[in-house]
Image: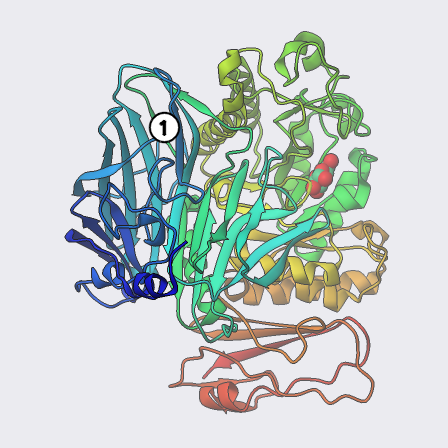
């Protein structure tokens, strides 16, 4: 046991190291910096507000050493466990959860030691092979740092890109096996970022089916915390997003680090607070039930992670994500195009429709001013309920009362575009596809597979399945005049096994599935750039940047109740632009939870996302239809601002009961204020707006003019709620 005296002495000792090289990636306002030591260890010295390309080596040297941690390479007081290693491997003296864990096939050892050998600046921001990734807009500095495990001859390439105008960085890792033996990757994170402090709160988006992406904010404590999915999809209950914020950070003040993984499958997003109050953030493919065999000369690339820093609160962090995704991630053809007001027949008819019902609905949709008619589940094969038909992607002419072409042209004659629903990744036992190809689904040969929603998951890794789906969907999109596709996915994985993979590669399946899905989506969406794709997974069960790289919008939740939607839309707004978040006005009592809200409230909430209707317009009264017609017309006037304006969450007195959202662009400011429960004898206070152009004035709908500073400092007068579920939309025009 050390004596008291030596304990004091140890505490006063600093790290012993010398830095040989430093790299600084700078954006307009932020920076990510790295340093290499004599020994070739790579450290992340800084991530935050821009400081410039200055010497930051002291960040490493000034760390007071803790007791009982190992020296590294026999160098006294070189304790890498206490230092912000950029990409720690299992086998250094950092004994925390590593970023990379490899088992070497030649000797079964699992120790790696990746050290810096070189770096270069790439001319272009690279795309990732087989994976969705962001593309460059404006100035992007792309740095590739190469690390080598010299004993095994395995290289790690870190590609870190700084998007100057977006204050955003991306990172992806590639592992290359240059040895003569196969190796197995058990863990390969997309990012590992260590902060030499733990005074953070973590924000994640959690929930379940029907209440997706609810914001959860908690102070960090020692140990692991975060979210993960092992469901085969990113999932309803967690999103591959995490933010670390200062405990004092609010919507419009304070520091926030946002992280989002461009991936739709099993992931982890979280952090570990270690014994000495350091925080290590990690995002990547979930190592649970994952491994990947790399033969000599082969490479493996991780999904790309997006990292952004804001020092003016959560709104700024979100707005950086929004701008970045709009410009650099979503398919370009629709990225900035105003989206049509749609009418989806699902909650209007479910499976119970015929030609007459559909056309009656389309008639009313045209009358109210909708622009796109979407035919949801039930139009193909034999599908009158969930028990049959998935896989048989040919129109059921008997049910449609004629050809699909005829239906489409009748819908189009009413002035509407036509859209259609698919659930390509699935198969029902009662389907022609199953009768022909019972071996196309995932299942373990001797076990009875779990049947969920009467369907099984196709093994997308089979080439023949990929070819079938690409060809059948492409043929339909070529044959028929379809303007929009809803790509659904209604169950998670349970029987994860592929007959085509060898037994030592079965743990590759969940990732291979996602790679295959991306391949299929890539082929279909690239071949049909004029079709607007919306993805869906039983609502928001796969709402992630991976899907957004192929589908411009995502159905946020099967729960269409306006009040339940408040938290989902608010949560999704932490990372995702409003125009990517679909929201529909549905019937009351609400089909999912029975709540009755006014048409005004339902419209106010839905139009803060990508707006549409999903109810039986044929069952509404004349006056309701007239009201909807006026709502749609008003929406179209303000659509540009609602879909693409800067989204700001305004501070409210009681966030549990009130939501206030501001959308603003160069012409308008639209504020939506919703109060869930009315509070007896309370006085509505003014709402202070944010980030207005302080050189101009704004006029409200009554003609009253305010200066921007008045609206930001004194606030907009708001109406007193007169009933529960009270919503009010205020439109201010720049004058
Ligand atoms: C899922 C979707 C719904 C609807 C149904 C059809 O639940 O989320 O919007 O398309 O499938 O079966």
Assign a secondary structure to mark 1.
Answer: strand
Q: Which residue is drawn at 65% across and 45% down?
A: 236
Q: Quadrant of the C terminus?
A: bottom left
Please determine whether, in this image, residue 365 is positioned above or below residue 510.
below
Residue 415: tell me if it is visible: no
**Ligand 1 visible in quadrant:** top right
Q: Nearer the viewer, residue 398 or 653?
A: 653
The count of marks equals 1
Q: Whole-percent x and y of residue 214?
A: 65, 57
Q: Is residue 533 left or right of residue 666?
A: right
Q: Residue furthest left?
A: 20
Q: Which of 649 and 420 is in front in this view?
A: 649
Q: Whole-percent x and y of residue 283?
A: 46, 45
Disc 1 crowd, CA 10 A, few/some/many (<14, 14-19, 20+): some
Query: Coloured how?
Result: rainbow
Mark 1 C-beta closer than 8 Å to ligand 1: no
Quarter of image, res 539: top right
Q: Whole-percent x and y of residue 599?
A: 77, 65
Q: Nearer the viewer, residue 307 or 349?
A: 307
Q: Whole-percent x and y of residue 432?
A: 71, 13
Residue 276: tell me if it is visible: yes
Say which residue label 1 marks.
300
Q: Residue at x 48, y 68 (%)?
A: 315
Please determine whether, in this image, residue 312 is positioned above or below residue 76.
below
Q: Is residue 513 left or right of residue 57?
A: right
């Amino acid at each position: 046991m050390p004596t008291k005296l030596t304990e004091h002495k140890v505490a006063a000792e600093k790290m012993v190291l010398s830095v040989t090289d430093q790299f600084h990636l700078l954006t307009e306002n932020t920076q990510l910096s790295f340093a290499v030591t004599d020994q070739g260890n790579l450290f992340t010295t800084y991530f935050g507000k821009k400081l410039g390309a200055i010497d930051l080596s002291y960040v490493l040297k000034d760390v007071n050493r803790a007791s009982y941690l190992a020296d590294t390479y026999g160098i006294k007081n070189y304790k890498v466990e206490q230092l912000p290693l950029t990409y720690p491997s299992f086998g250094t003296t950092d004994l925390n959860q590593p970023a990379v864990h490899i088992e070497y096939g030649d000797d079964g050892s699992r120790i790696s030691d990746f050290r810096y050998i070189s770096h270069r600046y790439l001319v272009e921001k690279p795309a990732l092979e087989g994976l969705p990734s962001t593309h460059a807009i404006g100035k992007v500095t792309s740095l590739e740092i190469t690390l080598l495990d010299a004993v095994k001859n395995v290289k790690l390439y870190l590609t870190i890109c700084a998007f100057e105008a977006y204050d955003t960085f991306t990172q992806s890792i590639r592992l290359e096996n240059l040895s003569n033996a196969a190796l197995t990757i058990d863990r390969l994170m997309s990012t590992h970022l260590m902060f030499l402090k733990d005074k953070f709160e973590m924000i994640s988006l959690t929930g379940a089916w029907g209440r997706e992406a609810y914001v959860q904010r908690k102070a960090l404590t020692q140990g692991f915390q975060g979210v993960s999915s092992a469901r085969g999809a990113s999932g309803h209950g967690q999103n591959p997003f995490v933010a670390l914020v200062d405990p004092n950070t609010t919507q419009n003040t304070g520091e926030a680090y946002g992280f989002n993984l461009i991936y739709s499958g099993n992931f982890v997003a979280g952090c570990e607070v270690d014994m000495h109050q350091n925080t290590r953030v990690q995002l990547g493919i979930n190592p649970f039930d994952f491994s990947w065999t790399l033969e000599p000369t082969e490479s493996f690339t991780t999904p790309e992670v997006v990292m952004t820093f804001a020092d003016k609160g959560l709104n700024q962090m979100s707005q950086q994500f929004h701008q970045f995704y709009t410009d650099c991630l979503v398919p370009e053809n629709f990225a900035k195009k105003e989206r049509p007001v749609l009418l989806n027949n699902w909650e209007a008819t479910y499976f119970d429709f015929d030609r007459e019902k559909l056309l009656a609905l389309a008639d009313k949709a045209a009358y109210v001013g909708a622009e796109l008619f979407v035919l949801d589940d039930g139009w193909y094969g034999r599908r009158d309920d969930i028990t049959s038909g998935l896989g048989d992607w040919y129109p059921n002419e008997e049910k449609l009362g004629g050809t699909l072409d005829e239906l489409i042209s009748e819908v189009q004659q009413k002035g509407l575009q036509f859209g259609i629903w698919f659930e390509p990744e699935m198969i029902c036992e009662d389907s022609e596809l199953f009768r022909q190809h019972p071996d196309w689904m995932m299942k373990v040969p001797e076990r009875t597979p779990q049947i969920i929603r009467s369907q099984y998951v196709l093994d997308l890794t089979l080439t023949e399945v990929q070819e079938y789906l690409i060809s059948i969907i492409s043929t339909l999109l070529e044959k028929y005049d379809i303007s929009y596709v809803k790509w659904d996915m209604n169950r998670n994985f349970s029987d994860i096994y592929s007959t085509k993979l060898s037994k030592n590669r079965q743990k590759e399946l969940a990732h291979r599935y996602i790679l295959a899905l991306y391949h299929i989506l890539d082929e279909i969406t690239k071949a049909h750039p004029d079709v607007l794709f919306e993805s869906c997974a039983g609502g928001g069960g796969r709402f992630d940047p991976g899907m957004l790289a192929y589908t411009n919008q995502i159905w946020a939740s099967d729960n269409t109740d306006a009040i339940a939607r408040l938290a989902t839309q608010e949560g999704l707004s932490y990372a995702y632009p409003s125009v990517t978040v679909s929201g529909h006005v549905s019937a009351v009592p609400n089909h999912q939870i029975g709540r009755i809200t006014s048409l005004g409230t339902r419209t106010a909430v839905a139009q803060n996302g990508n707006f549409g209707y999903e109810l039986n317009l044929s069952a509404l009264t004349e006056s309701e239809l007239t009201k909807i017609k006026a709502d749609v017309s008003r929406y179209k006037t303000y659509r540009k601002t609602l879909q693409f304006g800067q989204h700001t969450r305004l501070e409210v007195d009681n966030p549990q009961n009130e939501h206030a959202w501001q959308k603003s662009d160069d012409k308008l400011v639209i504020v939506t204020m919703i109060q869930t429960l009315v509070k007896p004898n309370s006085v509505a206070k003014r709402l202070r707006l944010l980030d207005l152009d302080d050189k101009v004035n704004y006029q409200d709908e009554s003609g009253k003019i305010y200066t921007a500073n008045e609206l930001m400092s004194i606030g907009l007068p708001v109406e007193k709620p007169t009933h529960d579920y009270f919503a009010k939309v205020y439109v201010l025009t720049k004058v």
